Structure formats: C-alpha cells, structure tokens
Amino acid sequence: MAETAGHVQACGKPRPQAGVSLEMDDQQFTEWTNLLERRIGLFIAPDRRSFLARGIRSRMRVTGCREYGEYYRCLCSGSSQAKEWSLLIDCLTVHETSFFRHESSMRLVEEEVLPAALEQDRGFHVWSVGCATGEEAYSLAMLVDACYSMRPSDQYFGVTGTDISLPSLHHARAGTYLNRRFRDLREGFQHEYCQKVTNSRFQIKASLRKRVCFSQLNLRDVKNAPFANLDLIYCQNLLIYYEHERRLQIVNQLAEFLRPGGVMILGPGELLEWKHPDMEKVRYEDTLAYRHAD
C-alpha cells in the first residue's frame, strides 16, 4: 500500500478544503477500521462511525487532504508518517483523566497492595498502562512514596507510564497541569508533591518526577514490553478500545509481567469473569483486581 514520497509531501501541505466529502460510506468505514486494527489494534464499533469520521477529518484539515482515500494513502506511505499516525491516534482516543481517578482502586493500592509489599522489605515497581497525560502514574507514585516514607528503607521504587499517544506522553513528562486539577489531590499531597509555576498551572515536583518515566507503547506489541517481576500493573479505561477477544489476549499478556504476589488492577466492568491459572481475584469493593499466586 506504499505510495511515493512525492505524495507524502503533498499530503503535508494544507490547502483549501472546499469540496471535501463529509460522509463516510460503508466501504470507507471498513477500510479505515481494518487499517486501525492492523496498525494499532484499535477497535472502532459501527455505532462510532461518526466519531471516527470526525477524528479523521480533523487531521485531513491540517494536512490538506481533500478525501478520505487521499489521507488513507498518506498514512500508508511509509515510516515518514509516524508523526502523523501519532497525531491521528491522539484524535481517536479519549484522554479524559484526573489525579486519583476511581477512588476505590486507589484505596486498594494504598490499603492492601502497598502494606503487603512493605512487609517484604523490597522495592516496588509499577506499570501504568495507557497513562494518557500522566495523572494516573503520578497518583500512584504519590501513594508509593507516602507509604515508603512512613518506614525508613533504602529500597527503590519506580513507576513507568506507557501510552500510544506521543503528545500525551510529552505532556506527562513535563508534569505540568491546570490548577483545576489541583483539587483532585488531598491537601497533604498538594504540599508535598506539587509546586506553583504560573497563576494558572502547577507542576509535580522534580523529586517525584524522577521516580516516574514515560514511554510509548502500542498494546498490539504488549508481549514485547521491557518489563518483568512487576509489583503492580494498573490498567483502567483502556480495554474499552478493544474487542472482547483482544481484551482477553492483552490481559493474559499483562499477567505474565507480574511477580508472584503482584497485583493487576483493571477498570470495573471492563473484563468480567476473566480466569487465568496463575491469578486469583482480589475481593475489594467496587474494584476489579487480580493477584498473581505465590
């Protein structure tokens, strides 16, 4: 499906959009959903056709492509379009998140997962899967740091956040957020881990940011992720983008990265009745979590 380099250059030059067809027919929808599933594993249900079309058109306006087919060929033109793929993905995935989103799951980490790990007197390694703009990863880092600070220890801890969106990862690494996000943090965490940078923004302090790293990862390639013996995998509001069978495959693969006793926390309702020979369900109100059997 590769096109010539000349087409790539033309596709990147904005030009008037008069005459752009706004309708996406059945064949176009099938072609686009197949491409997205092959390339990034993203599933777009038929009832979300208008959402898909809007996201694609938003990038067409920027690149100057006048038809879906032209933009399709632009994306398939080779590795030089990696940046454009990232920008399109950013349009097709929802980045709505907040600090300490889903309180019950965070309480499970704070009240059960971390105390159990402290008893082992070892380091603690967390993977925030689909971290978006970083609030989840920093929330988990705050919980771990606060817990480990209560008991003198020279054990290391770290949090890795992964996402497919490069713009979101850039935002996450900066660790700078609008002040309205500040209210999602408990008062003690506001003082300990945040600092004002402008009248409208605050930043996560460097002392915590150095504990958190961010990396791009396509869940299509999750089995090749560079992790092992993790204590916690936190994966919420991400599996909704995949068909049921693909969800099962992803979670099976994630489970392989846990150490014995490690915990995986999913979004409630995202994957019901999942079973794995090495995993046992964790009973905690309004959560969906599994522990790797010792």
Image (cartoon, rainbow, N blue to C red):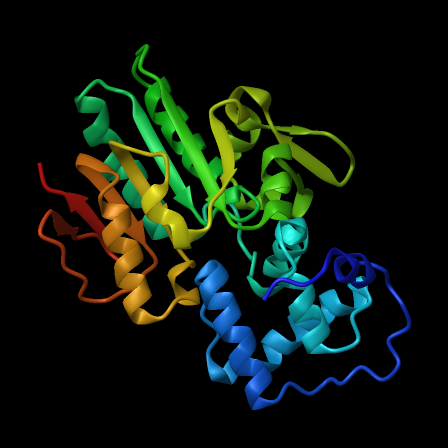
- Tell me where residue 257 appears, x and y as whole percent: 26, 39
Above/below status of 36 relative to 159: below
**Residue under the image location 50 percent in, 84 percent down:** 47
Q: Residue furthest front?
A: 4
Q: Specify the quadrant that holds the C terminus.
A: top left
Above/below status of 267 relative to 225: below
Residue in the foreground of this view, choosing between 114 and 127: 127
- Tell me where residue 159 appears, x and y as whole percent: 42, 32
Residue 24 horizontal side relative to residue 293, left or right: right
- Quarter of the image for residue 224 reads top left
- Tell me where residue 112 appears, x and y as whole percent: 22, 38
Residue in the foreground of this view, choosing between 187 and 148: 148
**Residue under the image location 48 percent in, 59 percent down:** 40
Query: How many numbered marks, from 0 up?
Result: 0
Residue in the foreground of this view, choosing between 229 and 64: 64
Above/below status of 141 relative to 77: above
Question: Residue 270, can we see it?
Answer: no
Above/below status of 41 relative to 49: above
Residue 205 horizontal side relative to residue 237, left or right: right
**Residue under the image location 59 percent in, 83 percent down:** 28
Residue 222 horizontal side relative to residue 193, left or right: left
**Residue under the image location 59 percent in, 39 percent down:** 172
- Quarter of the image for residue 54 reads bottom right
- Tell me where residue 20 appears, x and y as whole percent: 80, 81
Q: Specify the quadrant that holds the N terminus.
A: bottom right
Question: Residue 108, can we see it?
Answer: yes
Residue in the foreground of this view, choosing between 19 and 102: 19
